[in-house]
């Protein structure tokens, strides 16, 4: 059976450019980039070239890029580091975040024990920048918000939050992992102090990401045990993965590649959503249908829970996702949709990527209506 993969928002297949760039550093070049011998110098040069390419894609300086093991580590490093700067004087520490953040952000905030204010969202899953800023108080050490929602795709007013928080003298971390490689992300234009990105959601390798740290800002390292990454993240660097990340960044920075992929993804998800709505009654689209990530569509299906739809589509060779990322093993109701005030038990997220074709969209549409019709029929028997 030919498989149709429509879960790129969870992770996207490795791009050929990344694979080819990584192979020499898996087969031949094994030197520690911190060493002075020829082998170490070879990997050091490759690592710094990759850093420059990542910096270019995200509108940052190379020295502002701290390579990590992925977006989750970058988020944890940002939250822990920002709060660790304020815990020495014994005063209470306060964090402001929103109800639709990724679990990495919410769990990182909860683990610190800091007093946390969680700002709500509207029916599209969008928070209000003024409301976020209004939650900032005298003991606020960090505001952490997303650039785009990972489940319904809604783009967020993160730049406005950065501006308002800076006026109040508070650090801002922006989680851009869902947006990285899908829409333009410019660290300097955003105005954030800290920004998390990852490689694997846009066709880079798993196991590598970056925390962008504004020039001049010093935060304690989350991972200690070495002076790597200019003493900002201990541990030997994953050179092969970093090189793959750099190759993807270079590909997306060249010409109008990102713009073309963005336009293609938007067209395919629009066709997918309109085709699904036309073929199945009781379908609802969640999130902002216009100001959104181009590759994500979240659908609510009345009368059938998401799990059996997902499993039935899988039997038809179509891979999609339900619920929030990183918690699908439990098939728990989506906390994002719950925060939006909509039915959180029936969401299906379909996401396209760099190698999605029109045939993939057709395969989903051929399978979707019969699957829902059959499952609804079983409920009435």
Image (cartoon, rainbow, N blue to C red):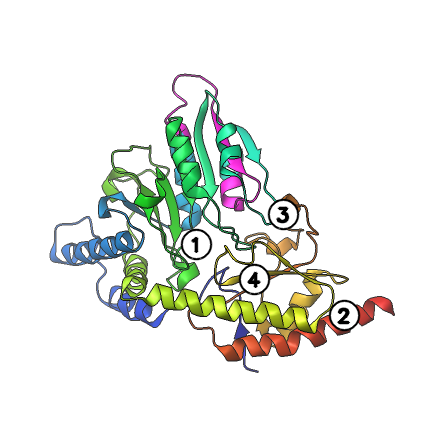
Q: Earlier in the sequence, mark 4 or mark 2?
A: 4
Disc 4, SS: strand
Name the image quarter holding residue 348.
bottom right
Q: Residue at x 35, y 37 (%)?
A: 193
Across and down, in percent, residue 371 comes to: 71, 73
* Range shown magenta: 83-106
Disc 3, SS: loop
Between disc 3 and disc 4, the foreground one is 3
Name the image quarter holding residue 376.
bottom right
Q: Which residue is mark 4?
A: 297
Distance from label 3 to label 4 (Cα)? 15 Å
Quarter in which the C terminus is drawn: bottom right
Q: Earlier in the sequence, mark 3 or mark 4?
A: 3
Q: Residue at x 23, y 60 (%)?
A: 30
Q: Is residue 198 above or below residue 226?
A: below
Q: Earlier in the sequence, mark 3 or mark 1?
A: 3
Across and down, in percent, residue 89 comes to: 39, 17
Between disc 4 and disc 2, the foreground one is 4
From where the camera sits, is residue 319 visible? no
Disc 2, SS: helix
Check if mark 4's residue and mark 1's residue have beta carbons within 8 Å: no
Distance from label 4 to label 1 (Cα)? 14 Å
> How many residues crowd around disc 2 within 10 Å: few (fewer than 14), some, or many (20 or more)?
some
Q: Which residue is mark 3?
A: 123
Q: Which mark is residue 375?
A: 2
Distance from label 2 to label 1 (Cα)? 34 Å
């Amino acid at each position: 059976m030919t498989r149709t993969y429509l879960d790129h928002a969870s992770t996207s297949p490795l791009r050929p450019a990344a694979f080819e760039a990584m192979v020499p550093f898996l087969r031949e070049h094994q030197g520690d980039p911190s060493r002075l011998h020829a082998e170490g110098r070879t990997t050091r040069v490759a690592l710094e070239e990759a850093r420059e390419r990542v910096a270019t894609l995200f509108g940052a300086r190379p020295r502002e890029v701290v390579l990590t093991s992925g977006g989750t580590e970058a988020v944890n490093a940002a939250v822990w580091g920002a709060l660790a700067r304020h815990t020495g004087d014994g005063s209470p520490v306060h964090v402001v975040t929103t109800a639709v953040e990724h679990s990495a952000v919410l769990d990182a905030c909860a683990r610190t024990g800091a007093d946390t204010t969680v700002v709500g969202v509207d029916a599209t899953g969008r928070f209000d920048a003024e409301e976020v800023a209004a939650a900032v108080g005298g003991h606020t050490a960090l505001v952490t918000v997303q650039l785009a929602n990972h489940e319904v795709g809604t783009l967020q007013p993160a730049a406005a939050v950065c501006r308002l928080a800076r006026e109040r003298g508070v650090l801002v971390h922006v989680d851009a992992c869902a947006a990285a490689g899908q829409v333009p992300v410019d660290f300097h234009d955003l105005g954030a102090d800290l920004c998390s990105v990852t490689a694997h959601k846009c066709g880079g390798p798993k196991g590598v990401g970056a925390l962008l740290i504004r020039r001049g800002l010093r935060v304690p390292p989350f991972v200690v045990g070495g002076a790597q990454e200019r003493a900002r993240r201990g541990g030997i660097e994953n050179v092969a993965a970093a090189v793959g990340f750099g190759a993807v960044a270079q590909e997306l920075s060249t010409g109008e590649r990102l713009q073309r992929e963005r336009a293609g993804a938007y067209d395919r998800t629009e066709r997918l959503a309109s085709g699904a709505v036309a073929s199945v009654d009781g379908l609802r689209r969640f999130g902002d249908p216009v100001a959104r990530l181009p590759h994500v569509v979240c659908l609510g299906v009345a009368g059938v829970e998401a799990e059996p739809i997902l499993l039935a589509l899988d039997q038809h060779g179509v891979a999609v996702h339900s619920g929030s990322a990183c918690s699908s093993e439990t098939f728990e109701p989506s906390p994002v949709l719950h925060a939006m005030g909509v039915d959180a038990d029936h969401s299906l997220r379909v996401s396209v990527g760099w190698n999605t074709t029109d045939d993939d969209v057709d395969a989903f549409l051929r399978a979707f209506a019969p699957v829902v019709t059959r499952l609804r029929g079983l409920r009435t028997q």
